[in-house]
Image: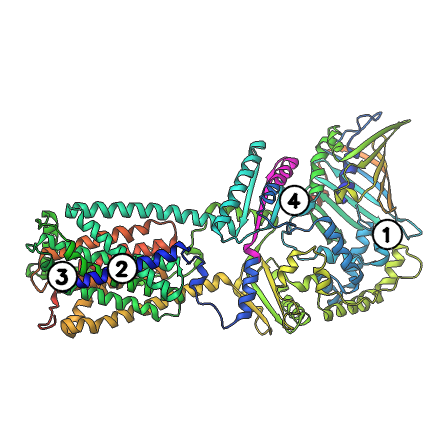
Amino acid sequence: MRGVVLATLLSLMAASPAAADPATLTEGQVLRGRFVQERHLQGFSQPLRSEGDFVLVPGKGLIWRAEIPFPVTTVVTPAGLVQSVAGQETTRLPAARLPFLSRLYAMMGGAMAGDWSALDGEFTVARRQDGKTLRVTLSPRRNGDPAAAALKEIDAQVGRFVEAVDLVKPGGDFDHLVFSGQALTTGAPTDAEAAALAAAGK
Amino acid sequence: MSRALALVWLLVVLAACVHVGVVTSRGLPLQTDLMALLPREDRDPVLQRAKDAAAEAIAQRVVILVGDEQREAARAAASSIRDALANAGLLLPGGDVPGADAVKRLGAAYFPHRAGLISEADRRRLLDGQGESLVARALSQVFGFAGMADGRLLARDPFLLFPAFLADLPVPASRLSLDEGWPSVTEDGRTWVLVTGRLAEKSTALAFQKRFTAVLDGAVAAAERAEPGLRVLRLGALFYAQAGAEQAMADSAIVGLVSLAGTVVLLILAFRALTPLVLGVAAIGVGAVTALSACLLLFGELHVAAQLFGASLIGIAVDYALLYFGQMFSPRAEPRARLRHVLAGITLGMATTVVGYATLALSPFPGLHQVAVFSGVGLVGSFLTVVLWFPLLDRTPSAPLGALRRRLAEGLWAFWFERRFRRARAVALLLAVGIGAAGFARVGVDDDVRHQQALSPPLVAQQAEIQRLAGFGQTGQFFVIEGAGDQQALRREEALGDRLAPLVAKGALAGWQSPARFVPSQARQDENRRLVAERLTAPHLAELRARLGMDGPAPEAGAQAAPLTLAEVSGTGALPLLSALVPETEPANGRALHIVTLDGLKDAALVRSAADGLEGVRFVDPTGDLTRLLGAYRHRAVTLLALSALLMVPLLAWRYGLAGALVAMAPPVAAVVLAPAVLALFGLPFTFFAAMALVLVLSIGVDYAVFCAEDDGRRDPVTLAAVLLAMGTTVLSFGLMAASGVAGVRSFGAAMAVGVPLAFLLAPLGGYARPRKGRW
């Protein structure tokens, strides 16, 4: 499930060939931005809202730092997923235990180069141009895969970058993510970012 | 008179032939299980049953890992291989990896009891008063990237303790996870898919091994044709057994053929006649048939190893035939005169050897009893054949002894008896003492049973790769837990677990699987419930609910469900592993027997000591036990060797006087002592098998020395030439085993290859003993 979310996000952020003026992310570039995540859970009257920033380094991984209301950093690399709170590791999931995650990593390469056909194998991809915005809807293709079955649908709005994503789960829970302040720079990640990715990639 | 005796013997032999023939026609009751050779640990039937259950669980599994760079190709190949094995009826239906449905049933069984189920790490944190860290974990899972928070789960399990418990279940193959129904792992761009199952028949059955590997090889070959980059790794007792049997057969076929051909050529070259060869074979054949008949009468069955070993011992009997036919090269042309001349020697030789073998019957090992009877009876049978039949069948004329053999024999006599070789003799003796001292300084023993078997190196490499890829690290050692009931057994496992956890942190082992980790004892469940209530719910729940913005009443914390039982979880069928860990549950005599298996054992001594002082907990190391047993066998064999040497002395003393007996014993004893020293100089360790070879060296050496003593000072080259020939055939038939790939056989062969020639070289010393007048 985490793999689906992750890979989909990454590949959507990467590029969308049909968009008016899509940013194409390549190695040697870094994408930074801020996010607001609203998690709508059954039985909760209010969504769980969190915000923070993220750093995406193609080929290296993703650093996702929630600051409000609870500071927690998630680093995702080809080696897996690591969460830490105040420098203390709280969760570590090696990719070897999640074949689905590693598989989506492979597909990411294709998606970055604008090749959506690899994703086609796992998802039904529907695209709809809505003014300047491209709306992409992904539905898991197979019912048998427990990982894919954990998601019902992914909806994304893509402009120059991915602007918003909805992750809908079968039980009715859904996450709504809004991205802002995205900036694409050329060059290496900062030392701190590189260190965080390296520590998670161990 | 002698004709009448020969006829009686013929009737006995015919009767034995008929007996063996009748039994064989019904199927020879051959025992092939190696374990049957070992004394059962009947002192402890509980331990034995637990061992059998654990060994069975391990031996009946096969693991096949199919890897390819294309995920789909790996899955297709795994599927075709599994189907091929299943369709041929080679695997039990059901497999042993739970499917998605079984996992769901498991979750459903656990969930109502979740209040008492927490992971070991979480429990540790609560005990250490670190409840906040669990709050932080829950918050990070809710607010972190790609959180797994589920609204309904959070309402019931706000600290998300239940997912942590499930993730902590000690399933083997810890690196594999289910990928669309197949346990898989991806590494370096290659997807590995697991095919596993339990064998439909015993992994030790040769025919089943053949069928299984044939079907598997066929399926793998087909899959490889479809996908050339495919890699297939195998792990299982069946594969080792099959490879071992194949090698042993190829081995013994080659060794047997070379040794047979060599012996035939040697005998024909030596005698330039067929009669000695034919009659020699007849002597051994009669010995084998009478021995087999006697064993079947006595034991009702025969162990194949006892038969093989016993048959080799009977092989000594060919020496009597050779000594008899050595007389061809003497002026004695009349068969009776030839027999008369060697009768004392071969009689004494036979008697001492039978005494030597009889000591084998004094050991507590059932296998050695059979060897003792088989070889003792066979030897007497061969002896009687030589004595009673040879004079009647022998038509060979006298012939001159070959010049080379004559010179060799005369030279060896001269070396030990003539004055001019006095210095050389002193040097030789000093040399022998020097070699003995140097050798004994480095003699090492090796009882490790793993060294005695020839484990196929490619299989060992595949096992290592599977263990690394899949995280299968199960070792052969395990704990056996006994309890007055399941609850007591579970509590004992928890006490053991409290000691094993720090050892995991230290790296002494990678992990362990106990029934208690799947289903904690009721006491532990109550304690967990209390820990959560006191150290988590009471101080932190309100705060967590506030931070998550959860309103409404908190759900009643513990859902006071009855504690979870073993039966409930086993009943889901989702955990075949758990069933294997519980060979005897409560209803059996009101007593429970559980097993705790170990992963990645590095420091066996440290882990073994974890059981110290824990009642009902025992560490079991089957390989180590076998190794200790081989060590005991080795000690026993050396003791028997000394004992049989002692028992031979009175026989020899009757003939040669006490001093003469000691003289006659000196060459074989020296050979027996020197052989391991020489082997040590070549870096070969002393093993049980080498000790058994020395038993043979002693008997053969005494024969040689007796033959020389019976020469009665004539220094007849004919005598020594016959002994030379006997040594040649013995080295050909036993010494060649030194070339075997099976370490135990090799050790046996090497000891023979060194010991028997030593006994021959020293044998003329026996000539210093002289028969006392009036005996015969």
What stretch of residues is rendered in magenta?
B57-80
Task: Look at mark 2 in the image and give the residue it sits on.
Answer: B13
Please report whichever mark, 1 or 2, sits nearer to the chain's N-terminal start.
Answer: 2
x and y percent of residue B267 in the render? 19, 48
Q: Is residue B393 visible?
A: yes
Q: Which mark's residue is nearer the viewer, 3 or 1?
A: 3
Kind of residue at badge 4: Ser
Q: Is residue B442 above or below residue A42?
A: below
Secondary element at tag 2: helix
Chain to which the residue tagged by mark 3 belongs: B
Q: Which mark's residue is nearer the viewer, 3 or 4?
A: 3
Q: Nearer the viewer, residue B30 or A33?
A: B30
Secondary element at tag 4: strand
Is residue A168 shown in magenta?
no
Q: Residues within 10 Å of mark 3 (few under 14, many from 20)?
A: many
x and y percent of residue B231 in the render? 56, 39
Co-location on one chain, circles 1 and 2: yes
Secondary element at tag 1: helix
Please report whichever mark, 2 or 4, sits nearer to the chain's N-terminal start.
Answer: 2
Q: Is residue B687 visible?
A: no
Chain to which the residue tagged by mark 2 belongs: B
